[in-house]
Amino acid sequence: MAKIIWLASYPKSGNTWFRTFLSNLLKEKEETVSINHLHTDGIFSSRIILDSMTGIEASNLTPEEIDRLRPAAYNHLAEGLPGNLYIKVRDAFTYLDDGSPLLGTRNAKAIYFLRNPLDVAVSFSNHSSCDLDTTINNMGDPEYVFCRNERRLANQLRQKLLTWSGHVQSWTGAGELPVHTIRFEDMKLNPLETFTAAANFMELDYDAETVRRAVDASVFAKLQEAEKKEGFHEKPYMVQAFFRRGEVGDWRLHLTERQVGQLVRAHREVMEKFGYLDRRGEIVF
């Protein structure tokens, strides 16, 4: 049965990299898929997509009214799908006032991407053109949201991110739908095994060689080169490059001891659970 596959993550955790792999896996032609024409189905927070699905202009609604509309729209979309839909999600897995989940869960499953929060802080700071201290504070703010600007109409709807730990826990603990969790570090260090497991979770029947070719076509260095040649329409205009470094442990070149301590104190429990801190409390990656 065809499903909605939610591709969920806190920002800068490997979602776009995975969508590139998935596009190269699903492609029908031999050539590598352009990073500006990925074969996925938009983002859950798209104002344009919600408007077209419902026939209602979200600009006429309050954020709370929009939130009540979003799960119903996507549950309706999930009925009678001709094939899987692969939809990016930045929202945390939160619940409405009536206790129902914000996301549509009918005929759905999710892949959740997470990354060492120390590396997330560095990459997210660059991506949002925001200083590191502010970014680290945002990652520890349970009220942190995207697109809350009330002075102008954004092309995306409000997205509640919670803290970094809260975001991870909301998805990995979601009981309403099957969730397969992938660490960025495993995508980098054990790509074939990691991407193959994800394809199996999505019930995509491709042989090992096809998966390997999709992995090879999507290595980070190739994405960087493609961005240099053709640009990338998802890149914020103030940022020099979307695919900046993609390195494991890049935080060591950028974070002070104080900043590292703040992040570890705020997120120790989740870092330990997912292998970013060892039993002695030492940072693994």
Image (spheres, rainbow, N blue to C red):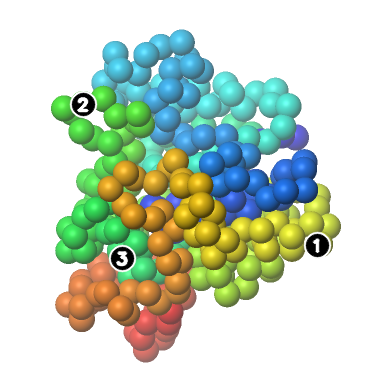
Which amino acid type is shown beneath numbered disc 2? Answer: Arg
Q: Residue furthest bottom?
A: 280
**Mark 2 touches mark 1? (CB < 8 Å):** no
Instruction: Find residue 152 and name its label.
Output: 2
218 vs 224, nearest the viewer: 224
Please report the residue visible at 27 percent of the width from the left and 59 percent of the height from the top: 125
Secondary-structure class at tag 3 = helix
Q: Earlier in the sequence, mark 2 or mark 1?
A: 2
Q: Earlier in the sequence, mark 1 or mark 3?
A: 3
Q: Residue furthest front?
A: 229
Please name the residue that numbered disc 3 is placed on: 122
Of the 4 image quadrants, the one containing the N terminus is: top right
Q: Residues within 10 Å of mark 2 (few under 14, many from 20)?
A: few
Secondary-structure class at tag 2 = loop
For the residues marked 2 and 1, what is the alpha-carbon distance in whole angstroms? 48 Å
- In percent of width and height, residue 270 lies at 38, 67
Q: From this viewpoint, is residue 150 visible? A: yes
- In percent of width and height, residue 65 lies at 32, 21
Q: From this viewpoint, is residue 177 visible? A: no
Relative horizontal placement of residue 88, taking residue 264 as reference (left or right): right
108 vs 249, nearest the viewer: 249
Q: Is residue 79 above or below residue 26?
A: above
For the residues marked 1 and 3, what is the alpha-carbon distance in whole angstroms? 34 Å
Instruction: Find residue 208 and name its label.
Output: 1
Which amino acid type is shown beneath numbered disc 3? Answer: Val
Relative horizontal placement of residue 243, taking residue 213 as reference (left or right): left
Residue 58: quarter of image: top left
Which amino acid type is shown beneath numbered disc 1? Answer: Ala
